[in-house]
Image (cartoon, rainbow, N blue to C red):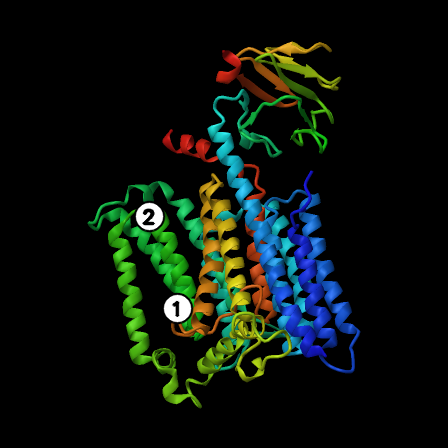
């Protein structure tokens, strides 16, 4: 009885180990893929971090590619999540429409600043080279080719 | 909508343990319910470690999963070979996970590691002298210290101290080492030879303890680090010359090594005697076939030292060559993660340290797996994370904890571009 069990389950056992390896390699693939996307996504608008990253306590990427309805905040479930204690749970939202990118504050505690000016409730259209301050972080907005034309 | 959900790695580990320990439960009558408890505790330990790393955001998420998978397979195999050893290994696994988190927090908490350059060889020497004075010999090598009922193997700790020493030394003289590219001997080269003597002192300690495998492992790690970090061909040539002199000398004058090389070249000449270990290992691997005999259906008990050095042969027999290749693949991914952590670290010291620890895992696996499949002469060291042995498992997890700590460092996630910018300045 045990012999039958064991000789059948050995196939499942080995398949499970290979599924594990597959799952990890898939994650590694996604990792590398997102690295490439960041590098090749030059014609999309993005924000670039100005702060020195080793001075920051939390994990922040060097740049984030912007997209429609892209929320940024401290809570999980935002499109961009940064564990900065000065960020609100849902802090601000980027929007791309009619070839221009706009930023809107979502009622955050510490506010969102574009070129030093605090945002009100209305969305503000971003221009190439604008400085965005969110929490402790300073970003520079870089309009991609698609937005410029 | 996605119909097929991608599997999560941690679920796979749970499934492997469930299948493995379920089979072991039915393996022998009378049924021992304790096996199910043992399996459950392995699942809980891996799950606890995984969720602790995820919830507290302690850096790289894969390192612990991969090593957890390797340890799970090892524990299942050890339980099948010998229930008492399997149970002990689970206890060691629990202690190792504690050591993993302890080394993580200690490494992050104290920033002194790169300044202790001269202390590392001193600690190694101290451990060595302690082994000589209080040690007892098991299997011909005097390298065990008994504290009460427990026995520890200080030479395992020396491996990590050795990597720390090299990393600290390189960090201290990194400016000097950058200039040393000429093929001639210069006065400044003297620092290199200090490093060399420090490294060879560690090798010498291992040779005196008759741990040839560990000596080889340390040399390979040292040689690779020198290759990566110092651009000096003369120094490389001298090191390679010393190594080949040592190797040839060992083959000619040390009977132990001579036997190992002879059995590697032709084990069939003396199957009953000197070639017994390696031939039994080859028979076991051969009888497994593609998918193996199935857990509990092979006869790995014919292989000597099956719990420690030859556990890879036992895995190949019962889980087949596919199982064996899976183990090697798991070490591949582990080494990949280690190299990635090393690449993405900016600081000189942590970079060298991450690289050295990864090389330690990689070469240790290569030496022992290559040994049991008769690719290279056999030297007795453990297979990291799988072999039975408290010291080996704990030290492997301590090294992994340090890698984990490096991966979580605030400066660890700098992209390649920034790093290149930094270097060109």
Who is closer to the viewer here, A48 or B389?
Answer: A48
Tell me the tag on residue A116: none
Identify the image quadrant of residue A65.
top right
Q: Which residue is mark 2?
A: B230
Secondary structure found at label 1? helix
Residue on which the image places disc 1: B204
- Residue B54 vs B276, above or below: the answer is above
In the rendered structure, the answer to whether residue B145 lies left or right of residue A39 reads: right
* Image height of B179 relative to A105, above or below: below
Q: Residues within 10 Å of mark 2 (few under 14, many from 20)?
A: some
Give the Cα separation between the discs numbered 2 and 1: 23 Å
In the image, taking residue B129 as reference, residue B307 lies left or right, namely: right
| Residue B219 pos. (x, y %) | 38, 62
Q: Nearer the viewer, residue B183 or A61?
A: A61
Residue at the extreme left: B184
Q: Are marks 2 and 1 on the same chain?
A: yes
Q: Quadrant of residue A46?
A: top right
């Amino acid at each position: 009885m045990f012999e039958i069990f064991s000789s059948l389950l050995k196939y499942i056992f080995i398949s499970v180990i290979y599924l594990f390896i597959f799952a990890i390699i898939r994650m590694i693939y996604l990792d590398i893929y997102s690295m490439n996307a960041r590098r090749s996504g030059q014609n999309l608008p993005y924000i670039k971090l100005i702060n020195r990253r080793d001075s920051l306590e939390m994990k922040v990427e060097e740049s984030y590619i912007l997209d429609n309805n892209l929320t940024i905040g401290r809570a999980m479930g935002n499109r961009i999540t940064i564990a900065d204690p000065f960020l609100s749970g849902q802090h601000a939202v980027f929007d791309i429409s009619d070839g221009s990118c706009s930023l809107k504050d979502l009622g955050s505690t510490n506010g969102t600043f574009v070129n030093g000016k605090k945002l009100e409730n209305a969305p503000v259209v971003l221009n190439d080279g604008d400085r965005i301050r969110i929490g402790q972080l300073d970003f520079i907005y870089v309009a991609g080719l698609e937005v410029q034309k | 909508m996605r119909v097929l959900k991608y599997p999560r790695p941690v679920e796979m580990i749970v499934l492997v343990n469930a299948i493995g320990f379920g089979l072991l439960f039915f393996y022998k009558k009378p049924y021992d319910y304790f096996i199910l408890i043992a399996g459950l505790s392995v699942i809980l330990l891996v799950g606890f470690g995984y969720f602790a790393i995820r919830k507290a955001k302690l850096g790289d998420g894969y390192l612990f999963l991969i090593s957890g998978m390797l340890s799970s397979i090892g524990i299942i195999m050890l339980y099948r070979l010998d229930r008492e050893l399997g149970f002990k290994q689970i206890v060691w696994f629990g202690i190792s996970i504690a050591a993993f988190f302890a080394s993580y927090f200690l490494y992050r908490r104290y920033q002194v590691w790169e300044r202790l350059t001269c202390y590392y060889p001193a600690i190694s020497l101290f451990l060595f002298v302690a082994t000589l004075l209080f040690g007892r010999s098991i299997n011909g090598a005097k390298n065990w210290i008994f504290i009460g009922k427990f026995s520890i193997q200080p030479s395992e700790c020396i491996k990590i101290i050795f990597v720390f020493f090299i990393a600290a030394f390189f960090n201290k003289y990194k400016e000097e080492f950058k200039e040393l590219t000429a093929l001639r001997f210069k006065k400044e080269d003297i620092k290199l030879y200090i490093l060399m003597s420090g490294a060879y002192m560690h090798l010498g300690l291992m040779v005196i303890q008759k741990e040839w495998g560990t000596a080889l492992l340390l040399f390979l790690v040292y040689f690779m680090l020198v290759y990566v970090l110092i651009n000096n061909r003369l120094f490389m040539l001298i090191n390679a010359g010393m190594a080949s002199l040592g190797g040839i000398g060992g083959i000619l004058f040390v009977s132990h090594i001579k036997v190992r090389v002879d059995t590697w070249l032709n084990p069939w000449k003396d199957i009953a005697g000197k070639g017994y270990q390696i031939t039994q290992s080859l028979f076991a691997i051969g009888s497994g076939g593609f998918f193996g005999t199935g857990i509990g259906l092979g006869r790995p008990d014919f292989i000597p030292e099956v719990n420690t050095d030859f556990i890879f042969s036992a895995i190949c027999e019962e889980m087949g060559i596919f199982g064996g290749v899976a183990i090697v693949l798991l070490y591949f991914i582990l080494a990949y993660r280690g190299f990635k952590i090393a690449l993405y670290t900016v600081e000189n010291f942590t970079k060298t340290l991450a690289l050295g620890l990864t090389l330690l895992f990689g070469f240790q696996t290569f030496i022992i797996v290559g040994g049991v499949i008769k690719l290279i002469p056999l030297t007795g060291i453990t297979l990291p994370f799988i072999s039975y042995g408290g010291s080996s498992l704990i030290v492997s997890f301590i090294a992994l904890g340090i890698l984990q700590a490096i991966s979580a460092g605030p400066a660890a996630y700098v992209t390649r571009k920034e790093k290149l910018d930094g270097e060109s300045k």
